[in-house]
Image (cartoon, helix red, strand yellow):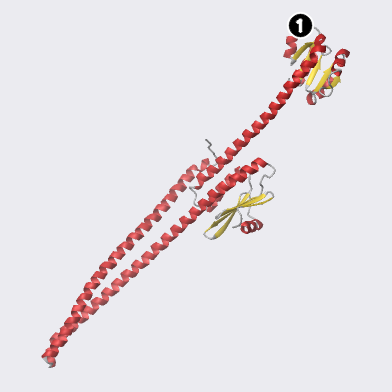
Amino acid sequence: MRISVVSNNNNLINLTRSLDQDIYHFSYFDNLTLAGFSLVSATDVLILDRDVDIFSLEELHRSLDGELPYLIYLGEQNDAIEISRLYQLGVDDYLLLSDAEYLLEKKLSAFQRTWKRLQQLTIDYEFAHKTAMDAMTGNSELGQIMHFVEQSNNIHDCQLLADKFFQTTSALGLNCVLLIEMSEQNHFFSSSEQVKPLEEQLLLAAKNAQRFHDFGVRTVINYPNASLLIKNMPIAEINRYGRIKDALPTLLSSLDAKLGALAAETMIRNQAVELGGAFDVVKASFMHLNAVMSEKIKSGNQTMSVVLNDLTHNLPGMGLEEDQEEYILGKVDNVMEDSSELILAEREMSQIFDSIRDNLHGLVDKQNRMLEFMIRDKRVEEEDQQVDSSGDNMVELF
């Protein structure tokens, strides 16, 4: 413990020198002016006596803005008014000079115990403060991730999704490069600048390997639809490094799930469009085939009717035997009956084609309604997102 003594009293100086020098480290000064610098930087306890008058003590109190070390004043009499004024000027303990031989060491020992407790309390407070700040920081980081997860539900564009992702990583103090795989294409995004070719090669080379690649302050994290390169991992800050290492997989897995949902949505939308086009082609083909068959059947029936009329009028004048005429007319009747059955079959086929056409038309309508619903739902989400865009940086914690 460092103690400054401002006194010319030999008895007081000899008394302090008799104390344990391994515990108490004394410095001696003739006046407060000489002790001034030491009081600011290297004094835990200041001992004064009657050699320091009230006015000098007032000047010291004023020059140090009241930030005095622990101050023990050794006086010669119990003057209540004087003692009261001394306490007002920052004196912590008043002791009669005649009692110093018996009480000074005990006063210093008591102060040392208090001082040690204060030091331990300071250490405990700093530890508790750091723990609380770490907890608050962790909650803030968790809040940023929750905010991204909530916001990403309404995003349907890779660029906007990357921007929202970088808002979160920037709040974590990270400089990142992001690789997104969408529709069998690679899209690269950077949080601070253009993506360098070497960074693209690094992400592609590390893809489809292990989940984490750590090399110095750089780390690559891989997921099926996204990979992230962090260029400034805080390896010197163990607690923060651990929190970020725990938080990033949650953040990136949410991004990966959203990308998977976008890919599935795009696939469904494209399939619906292609299926609708295929239905239109099949419907048109059926209608054309039905029309062609109907026309051919009608043409054949008309031809058979003409042939039957010609034979009915011309056979009697050909000189054929009666049984020959009956044979020919019988064959013609059989053909006409077959033609009538073909007409009935054509009608049934037309009904079947109409039913197929109606079913196809119903499927196409369902596909179109599904597309309209998806587009309308997306448009509503985008409008809601624009309304909420003003509060993008607000993180609400519970």
Q: Nearer the viewer, residue 50 or 130?
A: 130
Residue 207 in the image: above or below residue 38: below
> Which residue is drawn at the image coordinates 57% and 56% (left, top)?
187
Question: Where residue 259 sits in the image (x, y, percent)?
Answer: 52, 53
Q: Is residue 326 left or right of residue 265?
A: left
* Amino acid type of the residue tagged 1 in the rendering: Asp
Q: Nearer the viewer, residue 317 or 216?
A: 216
Q: At numbered mark 1, what does the secondary structure look like: helix, strand or loop? A: loop
Residue 371 visible here: yes
Q: Which residue is mark 1?
A: 79
Q: Residues within 10 Å of mark 1 (few under 14, many from 20)?
A: few
Residue 292 in the image: above or below residue 234: below
Q: Quadrant of the N terminus?
A: top right
Question: Where residue 275 sits in the image (x, y, percent)?
Answer: 40, 62
Q: Nearer the viewer, residue 192 or 333?
A: 333
Question: Where residue 305 sits in the image (x, y, percent)?
Answer: 18, 80
Residue 17, image quadrant:
top right
Question: Where residue 306 sits in the image (x, y, percent)?
Answer: 19, 82
> Which residue is drawn at the image coordinates 46% and 58% (left, top)?
267
- Please tell me how many numbered marks the rendered image carries: 1
Residue 117 in the image: above or below residue 224: above
Q: Is residue 293 left or right of residue 97?
A: left
Residue 340, image quadrant:
bottom left
Residue 68 visible here: no
Q: Nearer the viewer, residue 123 or 278?
A: 123
